[in-house]
Image (tube, coloured by chain):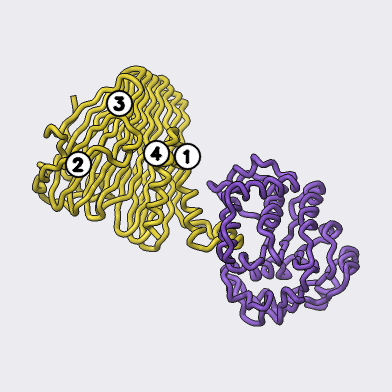
Chain colours: A yellow, B purple
Amino acid sequence: MTAPFAIDLRNAETFPTRRVEDWKWSDLRKFLRAAPEPSPALAVAPGGPFAALGGEEIAFGNGRDSAGASEVGYVARGRETLRLRFVTDASGTGHQARATVEVEAGAALLLLETYEGSGSAYVANAGLSLKLGKGARLTRIVLLDDQADALSISAAEVALSEGAVFEQTVLASGARLQRHETRVAHPGHGASVRLDGLYVLGGERHADLTTVVEHAGVGGETRQLTKGVVSGRARGVFQGRIVVAHGADKTDARMGHHALILSDRAEVDAKPELEIYADDVACAHGNTIGALDENALFYARARGIPEPEARAMLTEAFLGEVLDRIEDERVREFARGWLGARLEALS
Amino acid sequence: MTMLSIQNLHVSVADKPIIKGLSLDVPAGEVHAVMGPNGAGKSTLSYTLAGRGGYEATGGSVDYLGEDLLALEPNERASKGVFLSFQYPLEIPGVPALTFVRTALNAQRKARGEGELSAPEFLKLVKQKAKDLRIDFEMLKRPLNVGFSGGEKKRMEVLQMAILEPRLLILDETDSGLDIDALRIVSDGVNALRAPDRAMLVITHYQRLLDYIKPDRVHVLVAGRIVDSGGPELALELERSGYDKYLAEAA
């Protein structure tokens, strides 16, 4: 069973405006007033950014898989790797696709989810339903590479069973509007969640990382670290909400969002929220937005490192903390390479 | 040969004059101490020589090996051999000490048209220098200065000196925050760098450091000017009588 798309590209009435609280910094209706023309069929060659990591592949080309389906399901029963690719090559048209991924009790899945956009001014919408059985482990890496004038939306519902481990790292480089949303139903009872994100935005790009974690049971753990850097006229949005329901005692949740602003015209909007209805919980959030430390910059220059190199070194070090938390070394190295290339493109 | 020649230097910070007509010559091979009370302009002098933003030279000149030092960017000064040892070395989160030092060394070598040092060559060099300074090599894998004690930070400064091999060392209050053991290790490290083609400017409030790093000349800096100069005995005299005599004259 999958929930319907919250946003359905076929129905303009489902497009939120900034008057919807959760969309106040990402006004979809401003850019999309009517349902877009459907995108043409697209055949996708196997591979993608994570081809070297092997595993199974499911690829959507403009919203359809090779059999023409726009909904695909996958069940992981052992230790598996799945490359789930949302490939777009379209201009001025729109498409959507949905995937349901289940990790059975005791199984482990490395989900490498990529958004590979080419063309221009397309609208891409993805919906995911992720389900983890008892003691299952899902490591989800999301790579968002869209065109600067694209509208790209991805929303996932994640349901954990007791003792399950869900780890997520989102790498975002923005679009005209790029929204990545994760909603986690956290049962507590030994289940743990890591929800990390990284955004590197230049030009007029916009990325919105929104997460909601609802702790319903006793003794759940959530760790969240999002970092970002914005330059030019870019805009980064972070919305993180952690809800601890009545009775979800001994919940341990920590949320951090830290951003660097490299230009006067760039912007970061952040809304960290903790809603706590239980007793005896350990919850904390931290949020900082600022410029590079000028003292550290001078120190590096005084040791002979030219300013652009010193800035890049300090910026990369700042953001790298998010990547250090990725356990899989191959994925971590890939992410470092991605970050390096994105930072180079900024300067 | 004069390595550093400062003539009638005036420096303002946020439009406030701090250095007011300072002149000083440091020949190659010599160690010169600049002593002075709080607020005399000691840190302003060291930051001006290193090229920190916000320290504006409004008059005078600084000649370093025949070049106008003030016209150079901080990193250019470094690659030409100027090294400022910071009173409070900065913490650099996320950058391992090894990475930082290697980046600095290779940036300097590149600026001088020399090739980069290979990873094995660099590691060999660092291991030897770290051993001399009794720095645990494992510490160099940690982010530079993050969580280091005052003594460890100063030893990291000396390690960087030893690896970068500058021509002109400026030590800004290097003794602050050091116990006697750390002071001895740091001073030994600095003394090991004494050489005929290298000069040192030791900036300090207290005479204590000069028991370990023996100066050839001592200058007294009060209210932005050098008001007295002499041999090492001047430092001892200052220790006994303090700066009151000069402060009265300056006022």
**Kind of residue sitting beneath label 1:** Asp
Structural distance between the alpha carbons of marks 4 and 1: 11 Å
Q: Residue B49 vs residue A181: left or right?
A: right
Q: Residue B48 vs residue B212: left or right?
A: left
Q: Nearer the viewer, mark 4 or mark 1?
A: 1
Front in this rendered view, residue B64 or A250: B64
- The chain to which mark 3 is attached is A
Indicate the quadrant where residue A202 lies: bottom left
Structural distance between the alpha carbons of marks 3 and 2: 21 Å
Q: Are marks 1 and 3 on the same chain?
A: yes
**Residue for badge 3:** A159
Q: Residues within 10 Å of mark 4 (few under 14, many from 20)?
A: many
- The chain to which mark 4 is attached is A
Structural distance between the alpha carbons of marks 4 and 2: 21 Å
**Residue for badge 2:** A125
Instruction: Say which mark, if any, is on residue A324.
Output: 1
The residue at the point 24 percent across, 29 percent down is: A129
**Residue for badge 4:** A196
Q: Residues within 10 Å of mark 1 (few under 14, many from 20)?
A: some
**Label 3: element kind:** strand
Indicate the quadrant where residue B48 lies: bottom right
